[in-house]
Image (cartoon, rainbow, N blue to C red):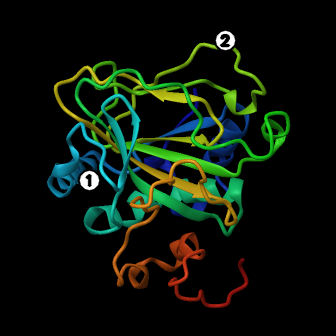
Amino acid sequence: MTRIDCRRIAEAELEQGEELQLACDSITRQGYVICDHVVDAHRAAALNDEFRSRYAAYLEDSERDDTLKVGNRRYMMAIELAGGFAESEVYANRFVVAVARRLLGADAILESYGAVVSLSGATQQHLHRDGLQLFDAQLSPLLPCHALTLAMPLVDMNATNGSTALWPASHRWRVRDENVAPIAPAIAAGSCLLWDFRLYHAGAANRSADHRPMLYATYARRWYRDPANFTKKGQRRLVYGEKFLAGVPADRLRLFGHLPDCPPRAASGHR
């Protein structure tokens, strides 16, 4: 199980450091990596408070026009890029983006951004991949990664609150291997899992008396659009106000280059 402590990565060593190579190798071979301390505990707690205040109406066991039921008492929803959720180190942590660009290309995009909420009493989720396989089951496992999922809990993921079970190396399966046991790592609020879109996984039961919100982001090759999880008319992949893009740091702006209202990037020697 590969874990990277993001607090120990110096900015100057980000692109060439051994941590980046270790993370990319882990995703390529095992299908996932754990990134600890993507945001600190104080910021994670503030995001949790903001989520519960802004989206209180969504903490009910009822599917809405703009949500998708993804299991028993479990819902997927878009999160507006505003307030704390618009901070670049939340939706596009510098290390996570470096991993995405190494695996998906320099023009990788933020394809969608939201939350999956496991309500109190949610049972074990069904085993699944995040998207449809490219082409067919014989070819897809041979291809390089085309999309990554980031899952950042806003409360600790553990045996009581529930974690996310992962089947290591299952992104390379042509057929499901029943002999492979899953792992369900404990993930502190503000840390995250980053996995290949093809990896089999399932949210664990929430045995606590409270809800378990988990931010998610999909980073993808520029040409990819998730065809499976946005089939309802009311759903949105990215939600942001008219002034959001103008405030995005220059090095993160490429993540939004697929959007029609993204301002052109200044010419430079880098793609």
In which quarter of the view is residue 91 placed?
Answer: bottom left
Q: Is residue 74 left or right of residue 15?
A: left
Q: Amino acid at mark 2?
A: Glu
Pointer 2 residue: 178
Pointer 1 residue: 43
- Who's the residue at 63% across and 25% down the image? 168
Query: Which label lies toward us, 2 or 1?
Result: 2
Res. 93 visible in picture = no
In which quarter of the view is residue 53 placed?
Answer: bottom left
Q: How many marks?
A: 2
Residue 36 or residue 220, whichever sits in front:
220
User: In which quadrant is the C terminus drawn?
Assistant: bottom right
Image coordinates for residue 129, horizontal then vertical, percent: 59, 35
Mark 2: secondary structure: loop
- Who's the residue at 27% across and 63% down the image? 84
Q: CA distance from mark 2 to mark 1?
A: 39 Å
Image coordinates for residue 258, horizontal then vertical, percent: 60, 74
Q: Is residue 161 left or right of residue 78?
A: left
Crowding at label 1, few (<14), some or many (≥20) Cα neighbours within 10 Å? Answer: some
Q: Look at the numbered discs 2 and 1 and tell me whether their residues touch, using CB distance below 8 Å.
A: no
Mark 1: secondary structure: helix
- Who's the residue at 21% across and 54% down the image? 55
Image coordinates for residue 117, horizontal then vertical, percent: 32, 40
Question: Relative to residue 264, is residue 151 depicted above or below?
Answer: above
Q: Amino acid at mark 1?
A: Arg
